[in-house]
Amino acid sequence: MILRSKPRTPKGKRPGDSRRESEEEIVTRSLQKQKVRARHYRRRTLEERDKYMAAMCGTSPQLFDSVLIVSLESTNCCGEEPTRKPTITYRFPEDKNAEHVPAELFFPDYSRAQRKTWAREEFVLALTDHSGARKNAYCHKFLPTWDDNKNGTYPAVLAVISPIRNAVFYLDLARTILKYIGRSRVQLTNFLSSIVQHSYPQNRGASLVVVEKCATGWPIRIEIFNQGTILGRTGCSQVIERISPEITTCIVASLLGEQRILLADNTVCSVSKLVQVMEALIQPLSWPHVFIPAVPDNLLDLCHNPTPYLMGILRNNLAPIHDLIIADQTGENDIDQVDFVFIDADNGLINPPPDAYVNDSGIAAWKQQVAMLYLHISARQ
């Protein structure tokens, strides 16, 4: 006789637990599939975001495209008195095939530069290539330390070029770079080489962290935050309050009408800020035409451009275009005055003046017709 014993159930389990285990395995596999799917979607989302940032930047997502230092160099022409002209004296990275950009664009008021003992001015300019791609130049005017003249020295301009629109972050980065300019060109190049491969901190609250070991052996931590601000949005309310909401409305209406708009102010900082704010007010629409926040002293002929533009000009440069500003705006024969609008920010001057709003019976009848049409459409629905 052969005795067969029942198979023992594992300790702590019951015969019906096999079905429960299979159900738990099914749930586990389902959760695992959901995790894999979530990872896949997240990876695809990050890839699409990187593609979007690359398309927006025009290059691979990196911190900046280039860093320039523009200085005033003396030139002698045919025995005349020496004049000073902006010249790019430093470029990082050193690319001999880089597209040529006139140095005057980074130093719009160079013709009136004087020796100073202190100078600090920050402004943002725009660079547009032949294909229409726009980049931003975050500029910081400073006094170079390599000129030890007791009577002062001519200022220079540091420009950080990037297609990304974030003035707060990049102007803070320019201040950090400025510290290394005061040391030596070698340390400046080493610092830029160490951060150029870093990607732009895209998320709000993210930061760029730089740790440097000082001479005493203690580390120095530099952290530059991305506050999520968009170029032209910072200080927007102060600009509107300064020039009045009425004039702001006229400028926005002129932008939507694709006219030629010229804004005047005293300094490069104020006029470029004014132009950037006005361009930001029409977002999410964009301004696809000529866009120059500050016209250089030697390029005033751009104001006679017949195509739509939004440009800023220094008040000191208004004399050469006097005829363009004060000419009869209603003259049909003067093509130069067609769709031209001039606004003086400080004096509140706008030429041609906007038409006064007339509250006549025609407008009241139009409002009544619109109201009746709305009621008729609502009744049919």
Image (cartoon, rainbow, N blue to C red):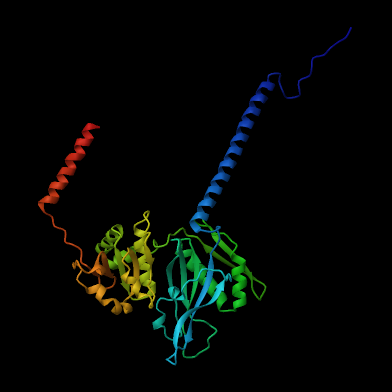
Q: Residue furthest bottom?
A: 79
Quadrant of the rendering where the C terminus is positioned:
top left
The residue positioned 17% from the left and 40% from the top of the image is 372
Up-down relation of residue 374 to residue 156 (above or below): above
Left or right: 219 in relation to 146: right
**Residue furthest to the top:** 1
Q: Which residue is the extreme one toward the front?
A: 333
> Quarter of the image containing the N terminus?
top right
Q: Quadrant of residue 347?
A: bottom left
Residue lying at the far left in this picture: please name it.
361
The foreground one among 222 and 253 is 253
Q: Position of residue 115 (x, y in %)?
A: 44, 86
Q: Is residue 96 left or right of residue 307?
A: right
Q: Residue 284, image x and y in percent?
A: 37, 53
Query: Percent position (x, y) of residue 105?
Result: 43, 73
Residue at x-position 31% and y-position 71%: 304
Query: Can residue 276 be spotted in the picture?
Result: no
Residue 164 visible in this rendered orientation of the protein: yes
Counting from the top left corner in percent of width and height, residue 64 is at: 53, 64
Query: Considering depth in this image, is 306 or 25 the residue closer to the camera?
Result: 306
Asked if residue 315 is positioned above or below residue 36 in the image, the reply reads below
Q: At 50% from the left edge and 54% from the top edge, which residue is drawn?
A: 55
Which quadrant holds residue 250? bottom left
User: How many marks do you count on the picture?
Assistant: 0
